[in-house]
Image (cartoon, rainbow, N blue to C red):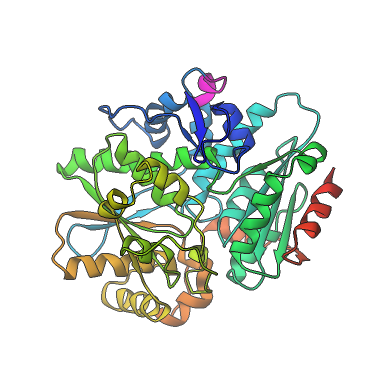
Amino acid sequence: MNFISTRNAAPPAGLSAAIAAGLAPDGGLYVPAQLPPPRALQAGPSLAETAVGLLSPFFAGDALAPELPAICREAFDFPAPLRALATPHDHVLELFHGPTAAFKDFGARFLAACLARLRGGDARPLTILVATSGDTGAAVAAAFHRQPGLRVVVLYPDGRVSPRQAHQLGCFGENITALRVAGSFDDCQALVKRALNDGDLQSQAPLSSANSISLGRLLPQMSYYADTALRHHAASGQVLNLVVPTGNLGNALAAILARALGLPLGRIVLATNANRVLPDYFGGGDYTPQASLATLANAMDVGAPSNFERLRWLYRGDDAALRAGFTARSVDDAAIRETIARRYADFGEVFCPHTATAINVLEQLRAEGEGGHWAVAATAHPAKFESIVEPLIGRAVDVPPALADLLARPARAEAMAPDYHALRDRLAALS
């Protein structure tokens, strides 16, 4: 299968080349030249085996195709359970059982497994450049830590991630460098995109991306939605509707693509925090990127969601059809706090701020009479946000063993201005 740019000004690329590049040469995002036709799929004995069946058409004809089963075994070696909530026909899809307690572990490990194979005997190290609003950087750092021939530079907005997220970002060392940027996530993301499009810099220090702009992260994220939908449909006869908390739109787009491939998924509703770019657009306004606002659900503090380009591509630029297909709702900090406190008091359920955002949206839908079976994508373990969650529920949140191990390590991050020349000099020095 070939992959093209959302901006239609770059030549088609094979899967391996698209994954290795991260960003297309014209600044666009890689997408399939055409989606595989919808087909009947069945859940495999494991999530990894479901992923192989789902992703095989995207790997067809590529050098990585024979490696796909092994890549999936490496990436999907922890569970993504669908758990029932106290309210009837409501569920959470727990995506936080990986090494850094966030859903991004799935895509980061898949991408690392792909790039480790693509590097082969290349003598020059490849630098993975990643902007993070909280969880991406730690997942990428964990996936690439000590991988030969690969190094990672993580940019994150100083003071706008949780203390435990910041500790994770700086606790790896060795081939992982953490840069705390005096700015917003959007500043970090703009710096990464500019570096990836800097031909002179690429000639000195080859770069690739591990943000959700990377095809190598987007494709595998379809797998847990596919596996969950298939198992739920087989057990209940019901399609599963989703509420997905979203910032950069990568995780939500994965669900949307999975549905387009014929999986038994129903409505997909987007939940955002006070950053209203998507709710305003889906409510009928223009798509207008804005400066991001700092909120309790910091991983969604995005004012210019990169994957919107891919969503428009999927709908061939038809804004009317796109708006008709989705609902996006905004939840402010006060409502996030109230939801966390109330769900614990009423049902003993504990959620991170991002998951609580989506729970609040699901409650709105139910109050409006929405029927059917629903699942909220639970994107991070609440222990990563103990300074927010614990005062609201009145007790300590148990820390998963893998997260506890990371928090026990020393951590260090370098300060950097939101200036491209500063980043360029830092990256050139790595070479």
Q: Image height check: is 354 above or below 93? A: below
Residue at screen point 80% across, 36% down: 203
Residue at screen point 57% across, 38% down: 111
Instruction: Give the number of callouts.
Output: 0
Is 2 left or right of 36, judged from the image as shown?
right
- Mark yes or no: residue 42 visible: yes
Is 272 left or right of 180, judged from the image as shown?
left
Is 55 left or right of 13, judged from the image as shown?
left
Determine the image quadrant of residue 50: top left
Span highlighted in magenta in the image: 62-69
Pick the residue in front: 75 or 290: 290
Is 114 left or right of 73, judged from the image as shown?
right
Determine the image quadrant of residue 336: bottom left
- Mark yes or no: residue 73 visible: no
Residue at screen point 46% across, 63% down: 288
Q: Give how far across and how far down residue 383 sits, in percent.
A: 50, 67
Q: Give how far across and how far down residue 16 sits, in percent.
A: 58, 27
The C terminus - image quarter: top right
Residue at screen point 61% across, 44% down: 143
Q: Give the overall secondary structure of the magenta segment.
A: helix
Q: Give how far across and how far down residue 270 sits, in percent.
A: 35, 59
Residue 221: in magenta span:
no
Q: Give how far across and how far down residue 366 sits, in percent.
A: 18, 66
Q: Image height check: is 397 above or below 173? A: below
Pick the residue in front: 359 or 302: 302
